[in-house]
Amino acid sequence: MKIINIIVMMAISLVTLSLWAWFNQPKVEPLWPNRIVGFAFSPYRADQDPSKELHPTVAQIEEDLKLLSGKVHAIRTYTVRADLARVPELARKYDINVTVGAWLEPDAAANEKEIARLLEVVEGQWHNVVRVILGNETILTAQLTVPEVIAYLDRVRQKLKMPVSTAEPWHVWLSHPELVEHVDFITVHMLPYWEGINADVAVDYIVDKYKMIQKAYPNKKIIIGEVGWPSEGRTRKEAKASPAVEASFLRRFLERARAERYVYYLMEAFDQPWKSTLMERGVGAYWGVYDVERKPKFPFDAPVVNIPEWGVLAAASVIVGLITLSMLLVDSSNLRLRARSFLAFIAFAASSLSVLVVYIYGQQYQTAMSLAIGLLMGIGMAGVILVLFAEAHEWAEAVWIRQRRRTVQLAKVADEDRPMVSIHVPAYNEPPEMMIETLNALANLDYPRFEVLVIDNNTKDPAVWQPVKEHCERLGERFRFFHVDPLKGFKAGALNFALRETAPEAEVIAVIDSDYMVDPRWLRDLVPQFMKEKVAIVQAPQDYRDGRENGFKAMCYAEYRGFFYIGMITRNERNAIIQHGTMTMVRRSVLEEVGGWSEWCITEDAELGLRIFEKGYEAMYMAQSYGLGVMPDTFADFKKQRFRWAYGAVQILRHHWRALVDFSPSSLNWGQRYHFVAGWMPWFADGFNLIFNIFALFWSSLMVWAPLTFDPPMMLFSAFPLVLFIFKMTKHFHLYWQSVKTSFGQAIAAAIAGLALSHTIALAMLIGMGTRNLPFIRTPKLASGHRMLKALFSAREELLVLTAFWVAIWAVIKKVGLDAPDTRIWVLVLLVQSIPYCASLLMAAVSGWPTPAAVAETPKLETTVQDTGKVEEMAAAK
C-alpha cells in the first residue's frame, strides 16, 4: 500500500473519531433526587399486552415494586384488570403510596365492571391509596363525551371518601371548566414532546401551563398525572427523542418540581413495548426511565452523553471505513490526492452513517413487522451505498487522475502490411435511401483492402431491399448483398451468416449499423491496432448526425455522450469496455474461436466482448468519432432501445455470473469483473427503485389511512435515496462540464433524457431477472413523427405513476401534516422519486412537438481525423 494511501486513511480516521467525540461531548445536568414523588406504573413485560389480555403476574408486579422501593414515594396505575388490582396491596409492603386508576372506554359494560372492581380495591386498601383517577384521556381521544365522564365521576365520588378525578392534558381542562366542577383535584398531563416543544424550553413550558390552570381554577389542587419524554421516536416540530434528551429533560424537571413543590408522576417507570404496534405512532413504547429489562436508560448522577457507546461506534465506523476505502483504492496508483481524499470522505461518511442507522434501529423494540421492514430497508440501504461507491469511484477516475494508462496511438503501417477487413452491415426493413448513403460512405474509405457484406434479413417488401442490392452491384465487386429470408437469430444471426460468407483472407471483421456514414480514415487509423497480438477488439464511439434535427434528438444526443466520453474511457483503463455493435472491429480468428455472435442474447455485441475478455484478449477504445448514425425518432423508440440494452445486460450477467463473481482463477482480472458488475449496478438500482416506489406509495397510503399507527420511515433511512439522487446529479453536471465539455443547458438536457428512461430500465431489469429470452427489439430509423397525443401516450405508464406520487404527496400533507421532520423528509423523498416520471412526460412531449426546439444549442461531436470535411459534407447532405 502506498504511503499516500496510509496518510489519507490515518487523516480521515482521526477526523471521524474527532467528529464522533464532538457530537458526544458530556453535558452536566442536575442530579437525580434520591427519592422522587411519583411514577406512572404499568409493569408489563416484553411478551405482555393488555389488548391481548396478557397481564403481569403477581410475582412480576412485586419484583417491579421492589425495584422502585426507596426510589419513589408513590405510583399511579391505570387499570384494575387482572392482578393489577393487587398493586396497592403489594405496594404497601414497600412503603409506596398508590393513586389507583380505572380505565374507561366506549364499552359501557366493560366500564361498569372496571368501576365495580375499583371500588372493591380501594375500599380494601385504604391504608396506602391516596386518590383515584377515573379514565385516562378519554375526552382527548373522544372515547367518551364530557357529560359521560362527569356521570361516571359523580357516581364514584358519591361512593368514595377519598379524592377522585380524571386525567386529561392541560388544554382539555382549560376548554372544559364544567368538568372541573365534578372533580376533587385536577390531574393534568404535561407531555411537551407531543406538542413539538424543544426540550431545552420544555420545563418552562410546563411551568407556564401549570400556572395557567392554577389561575383558571385557583381553588382546585393540581396533580401532574404524567410528565415525561420518550427516549426513541420521531422528531415532532422542535421536539427530538433520544435517551440523552429524556435524561436532560427529566433531571431538569425534577429540580424545578422540587422548587415549585409539584405533586407529579413521571411518565413512566418502565418501557412498554406492546405500545409499538398499535398506539402513539410507535413512541408509546419508550417513555420509561427503565427499559423493558428494568435497566436505567440514562445516568442519574453523571454527565449526559448523546450516545454513551459512541466510542465503540466510532471504532466500528473507522474499521468499516478503512475496509471500504481499501477496496476503493485498489489499483489507485493513477489517482491524484484529491481523488483519494474524495473517496476517503465518501467511504467514511457512508460507514459512519450506516453504523449510526444500525445502532438507532437496534435500540428499538422490534415487532415482526418492524423487523421485516428494517430488513428490507437495510437491504435497500446497502444497495444505495454500493451504487454510491460505484458512482464515486467512476467520478474520481474520470476527473482526478494523473494520466490515462491505455491510450490508442495512431501507427504508420505500410499498405501491403495492413490486414484485409470485412465490413458487415446487417439490415432489416431499413429505408433504402438511408442505406445507400451508408454504402456510399463505405465506398469512400481510404483503405487498401476491404470488402462490404450487406445482409438483409427477413425484409418482406422487395421495394425496400432491391434498391440496396442494385446499388451494391453498382459499387463494384467489393460490395456483396445478401437477402436471406427466413433467417433466425435477429442481428446476431445476420452477423453469423456474414461471418460464414466472409472472404477467407479477411483477418478483421468490422461492423456498422445500416444508418452509419463512416469517416474515410476509420479503417486506416484504427486497424493498425491489430498489429498487437493480444488486441482482439478495436472500438470507436457511436456518434450521430441528426442531433440538430429537433429538440428531442438534441436531448438524446446529449444523453448518449455521457457513456462514450465518461464510462467507456474509465472502463478502458482496465481493459473492460462494453463492446457495442457499430463502429467496432474484431479479430476474425478470435471471433471464430469464441463461437461467433450469440443469437440467444439481444445485446450480442456486449456479450461477445465479455466472452473475448474471458479468453484473455484485449480491447482498445479510441474516444474519437469516426462515423455518424441516426438516433431514434420518437420517445417510444428511445425507450425500446434502452429496454433492449438493459434487458440484454441482465441476460449477460445471468449467463456469465460465475466468471464475474467466482473466486476461482479466470482470465478476467478483478478490474474487468468490477466494471462489468459495477457498470450495470445503476440499472439494477433502477429496478429495485421501482420496487421501492411501489412500497413508498403503499406505505404513504397506510400513513394516510391510519396516521396514528403508521409513521413515515425513519428519517435516516429516507435520507439515503435523497443523498444518492443529489450525489448522482452533482456528479452528472460536474462530469459533463469536465469530461464531456458541454454547456450547462446540454447537461440539463442529458439529465432529463437519462432520468426519463429510469422506468423503462427498471422494467427491463425486473423482467430480465424473471425471464430469459425476449425477442430482439429493433430501433426504427427515420420513422414518421408522432403527433403530440400519440407521443404522450408513449409515457402513459410513467404518467400513471407520476399521478400516484403527487396524489400521495397531497394526501400525506393534508392528512398527516408537515410538523414532523420525518414526514417532511418523506414528502421530499416522494417528490424526488417522482422526478424521473416528470422527465419521461417532458421527453414524450418534446418528442411530439411539431417544430424543432433548441436546435442551435445541440453540440456537434468533433472528429479528430484528418479528413473531417467529407464526414461533415455527408452529414450536411443528409
Image: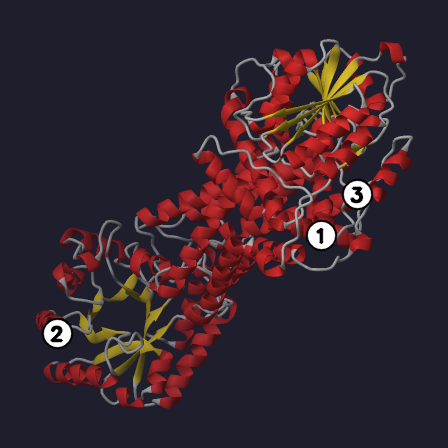
SS class, disc 1: helix
Q: Name the amino acid type tagged 2.
A: Ile
Pointer 1 residue? 749
Q: Name the amino acid type tagged 1.
A: Ala
Snapshot quadrant of residue 169: bottom left
Instruction: Using the image as rendered, state which of residue 629 and residue 180 is in the foreground.
Output: 629
Q: Is residue 356 above or below residue 110?
A: above
Point out the frontmost of discs 2 and 3: 3
Disc 3 packing (10 Å; few <14; some 14–19; many ≥20)? few
Q: Indicate left or right for 642 with 552 as reference.
A: left
The residue lying at 49 percent from left, 56 percent from top is: 801
Q: Percent from the top left, x then y, of residue 182?
A: 22, 87
Disc 1 packing (10 Å; few <14; some 14–19; many ≥20)? many
Q: Is residue 545 above or below residue 518?
A: below
Instruction: Using the image as rendered, state which of residue 752 and residue 811 is in the foreground.
Output: 752
Q: CA distance from mark 2 to mark 3?
A: 77 Å
Q: Name the amino acid type tagged 3.
A: Gln
Q: Percent from the top left, x then y, of residue 415?
A: 88, 13
Pointer 2 residue? 115
Q: Indicate left or right for 105 with 500 as reference.
A: left
Q: CA distance from mark 3 to mark 1?
A: 16 Å
Q: Is residue 859 above or below residue 221?
A: above
Q: Earlier in the sequence, mark 2 or mark 1?
A: 2
Can residue 179 be seen at all in this image of the molecule?
Answer: yes
SS class, disc 2: helix
